[in-house]
């Protein structure tokens, strides 16, 4: 069993914001594969399944994402090495996709929450670059991560999300080997 987690904030007001890049990535994957999300949250997350992979979008706010991740991990007895987290990273250039098999939270409060709830940072993660230094300087970090993508950035999202989907497929199939 594998668990793929997209980080974001629940609610329509956060659609297409930088902090919801994890949700966007999973929604893109679901659309391409013809999968459907649950109608109601279960264990604090909207969920869907393909084979032996469970996908979740935690419905607590971003900074409490670890609650749902821990609930699914414990219920399905999933080792941390079989959990993949997708999140935004404003320190990475916009559109850059970076995979690590483990790592530090590096200021990402969603990852901090997961680290705390799991008791480890030893789980794979995909960070998607949402950086826009000029806009970030004007807004400050909190407003920046909750801001919508610019029209130019929105145009690039399908290609970026396609790259993330490919990495999700690669990582989840590696676990089967």
Image (cartoon, rainbow, N blue to C red):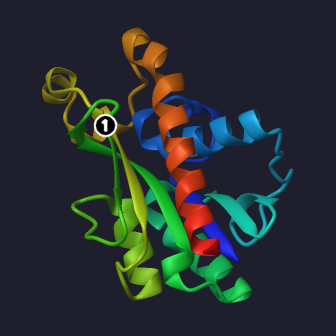
Q: Residue, x 83% and y 38% (percent of image)?
A: 34
Q: Residue, x 86% and y 50% (percent of image)?
A: 39
Q: Residue, x 61% and y 75% (percent of image)?
A: 177
Q: Dividing the picture into quarters, in which one does residue 2 lie?
A: bottom right
Residue 63 placement (x, y as % from top left) = 42, 61
Q: Label 1's element?
A: loop
Q: Is residue 168 left or right of residue 107?
A: right
Identify which residue, 138 or 30, lies in the foreground. 30
Q: Dividing the picture into quarters, in which one does residue 121 lie?
A: bottom left
Q: Residues within 10 Å of mark 1 (few under 14, many from 20)?
A: some
Q: Residue, x 40% and y 88% (percent of image)?
A: 119
Q: Is residue 72 visible?
A: yes
Query: Looking at the picture, does residue 89 appear above or below residue 105?
Result: above
Query: Looking at the picture, does residue 130 appear above or below residue 98?
Result: above
Query: Looking at the picture, does residue 89 appear above or below residue 41?
Result: above
Residue 166 placement (x, y as % from top left) = 55, 44
Residue 79 placement (x, y as % from top left) = 56, 86
Report the residue that reaches farthest toward the top. 151
Residue 58 placement (x, y as % from top left) = 61, 60
Q: Is residue 147 left or right of residue 131?
A: right
Q: Is residue 8 visible?
A: no
**Quadrant in which the N terminus appears:** bottom right
Report the residue that reaches farthest toward the front. 177
Identify which residue, 134 or 95, lies in the foreground. 95
Give the total of numbered labels: 1
Residue identified by numbered label 1: 96
Q: Is residue 162 left or right of residue 1?
A: left
Identify which residue, 114 or 9, lies in the foreground. 114
């Amino acid at each position: 069993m594998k668990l793929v987690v997209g980080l974001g904030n629940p609610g329509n007001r956060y659609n297409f914001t930088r902090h919801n890049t994890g949700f966007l990535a999973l929604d893109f994957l679901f659309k391409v594969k013809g999968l459907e999300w649950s109608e109601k949250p279960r264990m604090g997350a909207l969920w869907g399944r393909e084979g032996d992979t469970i996908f979740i979008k935690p419905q607590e706010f971003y900074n409490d994402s670890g609650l749902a991740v821990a609930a699914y991990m414990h219920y399905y007895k999933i080792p941390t090495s079989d959990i993949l987290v997708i999140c935004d990273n404003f320190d990475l250039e916009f559109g850059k996709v970076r995979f690590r098999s483990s790592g530090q939270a590096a200021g990402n409060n969603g990852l901090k929450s997961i680290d705390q709830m799991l008791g480890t940072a030893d789980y794979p993660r995909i960070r998607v670059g949402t950086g826009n230094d000029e806009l970030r300087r004007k807004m400050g970090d909190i407003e920046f991560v909750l801001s919508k993508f610019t029209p130019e950035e929105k145009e690039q999202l399908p290609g970026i999300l396609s790259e993330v989907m490919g990495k999700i497929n690669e990582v989840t199939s590696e676990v089967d080997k």
